Amino acid sequence: MLRAQNAAAVTIDDEPKLFITDPSDLEYFTEGAANVLYRYIGKVDQFKPHLIRLRKNIPNFPTTLQLYTHLHKVFVPLLPNSIVDTKLVQISPDVLRTLNIRLQHQQHHDRDGLLPNIDIGTGKRKGKLDETEKWGLIVEDMTPGIYQKYDIANTALENNGRKDGGTDAFSSFSLLKESLKRSCKEKTKEEEEELENEFTASTMDARALTKAGWRDLLTVEFKPKYLVQSPDAPRDWKLCRTCAFRSMRSRSMSGRSNTSATSEGEESRHFIPPDYCPLDLISTNPNRVTRAVEAIINREDGVLVVDEAEILVTDTALGEDGISPWLDTLDTSIVDLLTSYFSDPAYVTHVLADLQAHFGGKIGVLAPPTPTLEVSAEELSRMLAGHPTTAKIGEDICTAMSLRDCTVYVRIWVKAKSSGGGGGGGIDVHIECKVGDLDMKTGEGGKGVYWRDVEKRLLRGDWYTGRGITTDGTGCREEHVEYQQSNDEHNFTDYILTQQQQQQQQQGPTEELLRNGSSESFQLSSEFLKVPKSGVDVRKSGLLSTGTTAAA
Ligand SMILES: O=P(O)(O)O[C@@H]1[C@@H](OP(=O)(O)O)[C@H](OP(=O)(O)O)[C@H](O)[C@H](OP(=O)(O)O)[C@H]1OP(=O)(O)O
Ligand SMILES: Nc1ncnc2c1ncn2[C@@H]1O[C@H](COP(=O)(O)OP(=O)(O)OP(=O)(O)O)[C@@H](O)[C@H]1O
């Protein structure tokens, strides 16, 4: 277990020197239960396409320095190419104080219903930033529309090289438009082709993708949870840990449940869309993967779409019609795209499943089948806290819990094929997938006992073995096809989906899978029809009409 003393091992000197002393450099973006996320809108262009993640004041929660150290020591080596880029930023106490005052105002206005566009239903918008913190995290922003910020940052850097005062120019809206126009025009066809030849999309980062004419239009976000069954589950389990837990928690929210009710109880019944089953997602059965993908993209806040209003000028890379035709194409093919992506055993969800199996596949959370075998709460806490005799067990349990509670961001980039425009010549699609929020867990503050209690309640309430299951008896288990660990070489972000209209017109709505090293190319019809797959209700995702959140 990594404890406080290990935090001293961080080589802070290696970090970029970003020191936030002006609260107006930060604009509120969103928040979770433990952190508030701000957009960096200060003068240092290098940091503009990033978010600043600041910790709330929560007892027994690791410090930012501990989170950062643990991330880089434990998780980055496990997922070297797939973690959201995270660095440290120094933050002054005055800034934290001012931000807390702002948050208080915001919460006050929320209560009075004066901020109708901000979701306050989750109850997460409470709590203050920890004013004793000296550090924040600067994280790669995985929301869509990042290409605009890179375009601006690139142009600003170029301008800075030519003349002094380049950054000030960007405070002016009209100059911002001009710089965007120029950055689009400045790329000649030859330059673009040169860039294309130099790299494939799969080897580029967001900045290089932007330079090469790719535009990121939407991001799908979800937590992986238990991608492999809990070892505490009985041998005759029917529901996976995640579906069993959801069923128990809400009595109905499980993807396998046949009733719907709020957690308040029977009286306030209303439809809750089923959440996805993680075992569906990493299964090798296309029907199951499709079902998981549909549930993920239909979740509230599951998909962020770039805000068309924020596209300031006609971006030549997008073509005359702007982003609408591209979004339409994605709307009709997103389920198939993601189904294909997640079905590949080399990609992130499967790697996460392997890691979850490695760290949490044997011991579970120490919930034995009978109370007599149970260790005391004190003993459990000692184990999780890394008592010398049990350090490895405790460490592994905590690592597994982090790998279940992290966030997967899937950002979708598009690019016109050389004949230009989203409408005419078809589009290439590149899928970028990264893992964020890999926060150290310690089991402290009663958390370890909570983990074990959840397992005990699941076991003793028969939630694993049938309670909460649909009337047709479908469980999460696919008989005869148990989860296989992938030995493939892990290459996480290499994926290209190509839509070729001319070919489709000759071939009709067919899908062809072409393998190209670690990348995969697909040819889809632009009039791609949703052909129902056997046994699955394949609805149109309705991605752009409902359940989406605009972001830029
Ligand atoms: O207990 P769970 O499975 O509900 O997971 C908690 C999450 O709830 P979720 O079901 O994802 O909405 C919960 O997420 P929310 O606050 O509900 O977004 C936290 O991530 C919590 O971790 P921590 O206490 O902040 O370290 C998570 O706790 P643990 O992963 O430590 O159990
Ligand atoms: N790097 C990122 N790029 C884009 N969005 C992000 C990023 N990091 C966080 N977010 C958004 O902010 C939300 C809250 O962030 P985060 O999960 O880090 O907070 P938290 O307090 O740890 O949440 P939880 O409630 O799960 O404990 C995420 O669900 C996501 O929508």
Image (cartoon, helix red, strand yellow):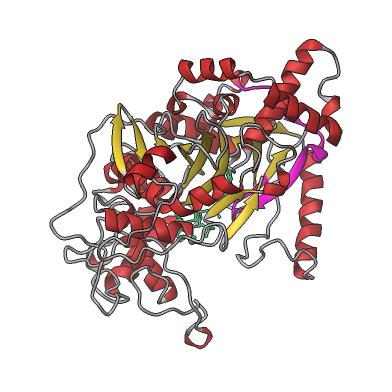
Range drawn in magenta: 15-37
In the picture shown, does residue 190 fall above or below 308?
above
Q: Along the line of sight, which residue is nearer the eye, 541 or 420? A: 420
Residue 88 versus residue 533 in the image, above or below: above
Q: Residue furthest front?
A: 506
Q: Horizontally, is 218 left or right of 241 in the view?
A: right
Q: Residue at x 50, y 41 (%)?
A: 412
Q: Residue at x 39, y 34 (%)?
A: 495
Q: Quadrant of the N terminus?
A: top left
* Residue 390 visible in rendering: no
Which residue is located at x 28 percent, y 58 percent?
287
Q: Is residue 25 magenta?
A: yes
Q: Is residue 233 magenta?
A: no
Tell me, yes or no, if residue 154 can be seen here.
Answer: yes
- Tell me residue 389's x, y (percent): 30, 41
| Residue 45 falls left or right of residue 98 | left
Question: Residue 515 location in percent, x, y?
Answer: 29, 32
